[in-house]
Image (cartoon, helix red, strand yellow):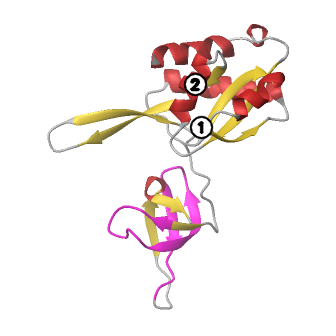
């Protein structure tokens, strides 16, 4: 069924003409861990939905497990007629429903993201962690430490300022190991 849902999204995004003129794009902010549930609900209700995903690989002692995870956790992109807003809002999986102000720009950007998720093997979200952000280190020898981002170099590395014992220390930590506080 995942292939069918993704194919439906790609078919809709391949051209503006395929959407009815009364249809508009919406961004559904979902309840925690409900993106795929909302996508299945949309499929049953015949609403167009897009959920860009990436493959996450976890290695355990004896095996390797692959998971399909949402590229933008907590969000699902929907297209439907504005007269159906009430029906969609009543879904038990939606926390909030937002309408992008520029429909054409939003559709163009969404089309590019879906193309990238289809064609690229390595894709992940670039967190909005920039200079001055307060973060918590999730993994590694510094796990549990809160710090301030001093500088960011590239997507992979963040240089942190750790203000402990009244002195500063600069540590390179992967963005993947950080969480905004």
Of mark 2 and mark 1, the one earlier in the sequence is 2
Image height check: is 4 above or below 38?
A: above
**Magenta stretch in the rendered image:** 136-164
Q: Is residue 5 visible?
A: yes
Q: Position of residue 141 (x, y in %)?
A: 32, 68
Q: Residues within 10 Å of mark 1 (few under 14, many from 20)?
A: many
Q: Nearer the viewer, residue 170 or 73?
A: 73
**Cα–Cα span, label 2 and label 1:** 9 Å
Q: Position of residue 32 (x, y in %)?
A: 54, 46
On the rendered structure, is 23 left or right of 58? right
Asked if marks 2 and 1 touch (Cβ < 8 Å), the reply is yes
Image height check: is 49 above or below 136?
A: above
Give me the residue at 79% from left, 35% from top: 99
Question: In the drawing, what numbered circle is on residue 41?
Answer: 2
In this view, which residue lies farthest toward the top?
18
Q: Nearer the viewer, residue 130 or 31?
A: 31
Which residue is disc 1 drawn over?
Answer: 93
Give me the residue at 58% from left, 21% from top: 115
Whether residue 69 is in magenta: the answer is: no
Q: Name the secondary structure under disc 1.
A: loop
């Amino acid at each position: 069924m995942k292939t069918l849902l993704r194919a439906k999204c790609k078919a809709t995004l391949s051209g503006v003409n395929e959407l009815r003129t009364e249809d508009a794009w919406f961004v559904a902010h979902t309840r925690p861990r409900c993106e795929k549930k909302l996508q299945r609900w949309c499929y049953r209700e015949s609403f167009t939905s897009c959920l860009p995903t990436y493959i996450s690989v976890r290695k355990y002692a004896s095996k390797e497990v692959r998971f399909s995870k949402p590229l933008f956790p907590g969000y699902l992109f929907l297209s439907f007629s504005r007269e159906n807003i009430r029906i969609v809002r009543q879904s038990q999986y939606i926390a909030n429903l937002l309408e992008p102000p520029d429909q054409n720009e939003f559709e163009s950007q969404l089309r590019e993201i879906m193309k990238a998720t289809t064609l690229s093997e390595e894709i992940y979200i670039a967190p909005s962690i920039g200079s001055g952000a307060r973060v918590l280190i999730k993994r590694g020898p510094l796990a549990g430490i809160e710090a301030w981002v001093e500088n960011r170099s590239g997507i992979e590395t963040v240089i942190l300022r750790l203000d402990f014992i009244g002195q500063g220390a600069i540590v390179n930590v992967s963005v993947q190991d950080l969480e905004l506080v």
